[in-house]
Image (tube, rainbow, N blue to C red):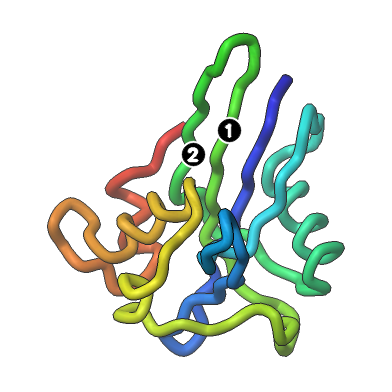
């Protein structure tokens, strides 16, 4: 079985779009993302369609900033995150905009914490935007 977690890192006016979620009776945050099982479409298409269905937002995919697959028994768990631009005017109210310096103050769910670390500390350098980090840790 293939399980995929595909997320979008969306920046507008220096702020990052995130979703608060409750997990294990604690509040966490995550980047807008979709989860699929045994999908046959490309990750970019899954992400575009999934975000439209889940949040009602349209995005333009810019580039892949992180991708890694993990094998667990006969299953593969895949994480992929893309830099994306928001094409919709405004995201739904359950999504929030956070300043970069506020990313360190919140708890990200597993997978998304890797992207937070890339944004805040790309090889010891603070990244000013997602495109800056794409060259440091891009994985295929």
Q: Which mark is residue 6?
A: none
Q: Nearer the viewer, mark 1 or mark 2?
A: 1
x%, y% of residue 108?
A: 45, 60
Residue found at the very far front of the displayed protein: 25
Instruction: Determine the image quadrant of residue 137.
Output: top left
Q: Quadrant for the N terminus, please.
A: top right
Looking at the image, residue 139 sits to the left or right of residue 69; the answer is: left
Instruction: Determine the image quadrant of residue 91.
Output: bottom right
Element under disc 1: strand
Q: Is residue 97 above or below residue 39?
A: below
Please name the residue shown 51% across and 49% down the image: 64
Please name the residue shown 33% across and 75% down the image: 105
Where does label 1 land, which residue?
78
Residue found at the very far left of the displayed protein: 124
Q: Badge 2 local density, few (<14 within 10 Å), some, or many (20+)?
A: some
Instruction: Determine the image quadrant of residue 59.
Output: bottom right
Q: Are marks 1 and 2 in contact (CB under 8 Å)?
A: yes
Q: Which mark is residue 67?
A: 2
Q: Badge 1 local density, few (<14 within 10 Å), some, or many (20+)?
A: some
x%, y% of residue 99?
A: 39, 84
x%, y% of residue 136?
A: 28, 48
Question: Which is nearer the N-term, disc 1 or disc 2?
Answer: 2
Please name the residue shown 53% across and 18% down the image: 71
């Amino acid at each position: 079985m293939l399980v995929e977690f595909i997320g979008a890192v969306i920046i507008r006016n220096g702020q990052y779009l995130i979703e608060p979620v409750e997990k294990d009776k604690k509040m966490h945050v995550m980047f807008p993302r979709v989860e699929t099982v045994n999908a046959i479409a490309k990750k970019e298409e899954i992400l575009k369609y999934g975000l439209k269905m889940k949040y009602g937002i349209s995005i333009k995919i810019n580039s892949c900033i992180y991708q890694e697959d993990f094998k667990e028994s006969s299953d593969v768990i895949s994480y992929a995150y893309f830099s994306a631009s928001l094409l919709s005017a405004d995201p739904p109210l359950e999504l929030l905009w956070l300043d970069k310096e506020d990313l360190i103050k919140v708890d990200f769910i597993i997978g998304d914490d890797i992207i937070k670390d890339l944004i805040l500390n790309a090889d010891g350098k603070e990244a000013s935007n997602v495109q800056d980090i794409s060259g440091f840790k891009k994985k295929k």
